[in-house]
Amino acid sequence: MAIKEGLRPGGRSARVQESVHRAVRQLLETHERSGVTVPMIAACAGVTPSTIYRRWGDLSVLLADVALARMRPDTEPANTGSLRGDLQAWAEQYLDEMSSDVGRNMMRDVQSSPTPGYCVSILSGQLQVIVDRYPQEQPPSVDHLINLLAAPTVFRILFSALPLPVEELHALIELALKN
Amino acid sequence: MAIKEGLRPGGRSARVQESVHRAVRQLLETHERSGVTVPMIAACAGVTPSTIYRRWGDLSVLLADVALARMRPDTEPANTGSLRGDLQAWAEQYLDEMSSDVGRNMMRDVQSSPTPGYCVSILSGQLQVIVDRYPQEQPPSVDHLINLLAAPTVFRILFSALPLPVEELHALIELALKN
């Protein structure tokens, strides 16, 4: 809900949104993504197609909205008791999730969002939670962690033949902690 | 040509490819991208639509192929006489090109390529030329430069509200040179 409000302020019904999002998630599990259409989603969600067009504009924006909602984690980042440990746990999970088919598709869909910047806001929020746990360690800035950990992870998945090796990710964490 | 051969080895005619690529570039300059179709490209290139479908499969693959060809630079990276200078010149130009509308669209199209990894090969080739000029400076590895310079540049453009500030790019170059 919070995401939808952030993207598109206004008093539209949260129940419609939830039911449309759920329909999209269900259909993406059972169909090729190129076979999913607005009328199918509408039928599955029990709304009219025009409700969807009115609210989201077109399918790519709806898919982006669902992808952003999925990216919003349900829980706080793991607390391992050390800055290094928290960053390793977070970065390994992020690499894992993003290099899955679901993660790849989420990243592609999010690029069609009218507010792709919301993606970095979600990541920043998670990293800020970690950084705030260890003020005495003079942790690196969240922007620096995005540049050194999230960016190479995503860049390699989207544009390289192979994802970032975990050892390289660990070396980047050490580099980020050196500052 | 080299690109096409890399993507799809075989003896297909280079003239057809050049004329189809040129048609795509022209149409993208004069039309909304969502309005460009295979029949339009075929008409503009003087080939049949089935030639295009046979060779590229579908429009997204053709657009990706054109985007990859555009990414291949015509010239070697600028030689400023120092490793730092060459990296700054290269990274600033890359940031500049990728944050333009043309650059953004290229990055999106390339993701539909059957070989998106070719994108990192092109970048690696350019950075290798720079690195090879200064063996006595024990330059960082090309992979490290991709992680620290190219990845944050692209990640911010695709997923953040604002591109990477040039000062932050310079700081990342210094960090890469520290190793």
Image: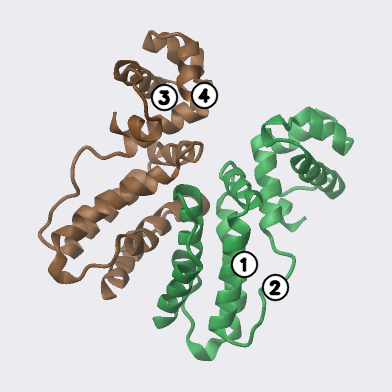
Chain colours: A green, B brown
Q: Residue at x 67, y 77 (%)?
A: A78
Q: Are marks 3 and 1 on the same chain?
A: no
Q: Residue at x 58, y 69 (%)?
A: A92
Which callout, 3 or 4, points at the residue further toward the start of the chain? Answer: 3
Q: Which residue is mark 3?
A: B28
Closer to the eye: label 2 or 1: 1
- Identify the element where label 3 is drawn: helix
Which chain letter matches label 3?
B
State the CA–CA distance, disc 2 to disc 1: 13 Å
Q: Residue at x 23, y 59 (%)?
A: B87
Classed neighbour count for the residue bearing mark 1: other residues with Cα under 10 Å, few (<14), some (14–19), many (≥20) = few
Q: Amino acid at mark 2?
A: Glu
Q: Amino acid at mark 4?
A: Gly
Image quarter where the N terminus of chain B lies is: top left
Which chain letter matches label 4?
B
From the viewer's perspective, tell me whether residue A101 is left or right of residue A35. Answer: left
Classed neighbour count for the residue bearing mark 2: other residues with Cα under 10 Å, few (<14), some (14–19), many (≥20) = few
Could you say which disc has been placed on residue A76 in the image? 2
The image shows residue B153 at horizontal and vertical percentages of 39, 55
Q: Which residue is mark 1?
A: A93
User: Is residue A136 at all visible to an observer of this figure?
Assistant: yes
Q: Which residue is mark 4?
A: B57
The image shows residue B107 at horizontal and vertical percentages of 44, 42
Q: Residue at x 30, y 20 (%)?
A: B14
Q: Is the Cβ of the residue at disc 3 closer than 8 Å to that at disc 4? A: no
State the CA–CA distance, disc 3 to disc 1: 39 Å
Image quarter where the C terminus of chain B lies is: bottom left
Establish if A134 lies above or below B59.
below
State the CA–CA distance, disc 4 to disc 2: 44 Å
- Identify the element where label 1 is drawn: helix
- Identify the element where label 4 is drawn: loop
